[in-house]
Image (cartoon, rainbow, N blue to C red):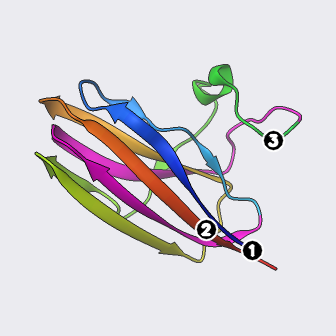
Amino acid sequence: MKFANRIDSDKSFAASFNGDPMKLESIEGYSICATWSGGVGTLKLQASNNAQKDNVGDLTVAQMADPAAVWVDITGSSVAVSGAGDQFWNVADVYYKWFRVVYTRTSGTGTFTAYLNVKGIT
């Protein structure tokens, strides 16, 4: 199983943000191709095994902000942002349920878009 889609489309770099959580059930690896138009700060990936879900498997807005959800930085995923740029993350051997992109703003503005591709267990 493979698919690609746009995630975190046109997010603003005018403030820090936690990207939309992406479910990785039955996924063995993923890649993200990200691009941004400006800003100064840091991008990183985070993972979680205990983020709550509703009965169809999607996180609701309230659950994304749930303090019981533990999000941990994925080692080696941090990228410094200073003006326009792009980044490619290739992540294999995925053994967690959820991931998200996190931006911590220092200054400036811009927009951020990322595309996700996954390979699942068939």
Residue 7 sits above or below residue 28 on the image: above
Q: Which residue is mark 1?
A: 1
- Left or right, 104 with reference to 64: left
**Residue extent of the magenta highlight:** 26-55
Give the camera-side residue of 67 and 20: 20
x, y (%) of residue 8? 46, 41
State the image coordinates of residue 67 (x, y, percent, origin top left): 58, 25
Q: Residue at x 39, y 42 (%)?
A: 102
Q: Nearer the viewer, mark 1 or mark 3?
A: 1
Badge 3 density bin: few <14, some 14–19, many ≥20, Cα 10 Å: few
Q: Which residue is mark 2?
A: 118
Disc number lying in front (2 or 3): 2
| Element marked by disc 3 | loop
Residue that carries the numbered disc 3 in the rendered image: 57
Give the CA separation, mark 2 to mark 3. 18 Å
Q: Quadrant of the N terminus?
A: bottom right
Q: Is residue 26 something one can see in this rendering? A: yes
Disc 1 element: loop
Is 53 rendered above or below residue 84?
Answer: above
Extreme residue in the top direction: 62
